[in-house]
Amino acid sequence: MWGIRSYLLFIGWAPYYLNLLYDVLIIYKAEVRNISVVMKGKNKGGEKRGEKMGFIHARVKIRNLTDPSKYGEVELMVDTGALYSVVPGVLLNEIEVKPKRRRKFMLANGEMIERDVSDIFYEFNEFEGAAPAIFGESKDNPVLGVTALEAMGLEVDPITKKLKPTTLLLL
């Protein structure tokens, strides 16, 4: 069953499998301890490993829909898992955006909160569109949600970690 060729083949691949097993054990230990891991070296394609999965931020101009001459700029973290965008309420008040409705939201920890919501106009480079925005409080992270991204015709490129135009679907 185990001829010389099989044995040599096994020995040839052993370092690869041992390295793979080592990587899996390191990641498993990290998940158990709830820490992040940065792998070193190169992957099969020869590209460098070692970059953590990063956050994408975008500097967005926001305008009051009823009076577009009133605007401000804000740095937002792009979150494709968030439906609505969270914009600092202080900025929305500065450009005189009035709350249209109050909504309840569930946080990741299960806590229920209420926030004011209104529609605003978003601009990122030459892309623009209107979408809802949550009036963020001081402890809320400013977020660019998927409805604003879709309104502007943008998507996240996971390779370049930048926003890029998307093909919009008419369903």
Image: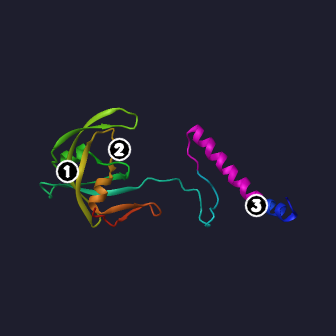
Q: Which residues are magenta?
A: 14-37
Cβ–Cβ under 8 Å for marks 3 and 1 = no
Q: Which residue is mark 3?
A: 13
The residue pinned by badge 2 equals 141
**CB under 8 Å between callouts 2 and 3?**
no
Res 41 quadrant in image:
bottom right
Magenta includes 126?
A: no
Q: Amino acid at mark 3?
A: Trp
- x 18%, y 41%: residue: 101
Label 3 vs label 1, nearer the camera: 3
Q: Inspect the image, locate mark 2, and give the three-letter code of the amino acid beneath it.
A: Asn
Q: Amino acid at mark 1?
A: Asp
Q: Position of residue 88 (x, y in %)?
A: 27, 45
- Which label number is shown at residue 119? 1
Considering only order in the chain, which callout, 1 or 3, is on the residue closer to the N terminus?
3
Left or right position of 80 against 44: left
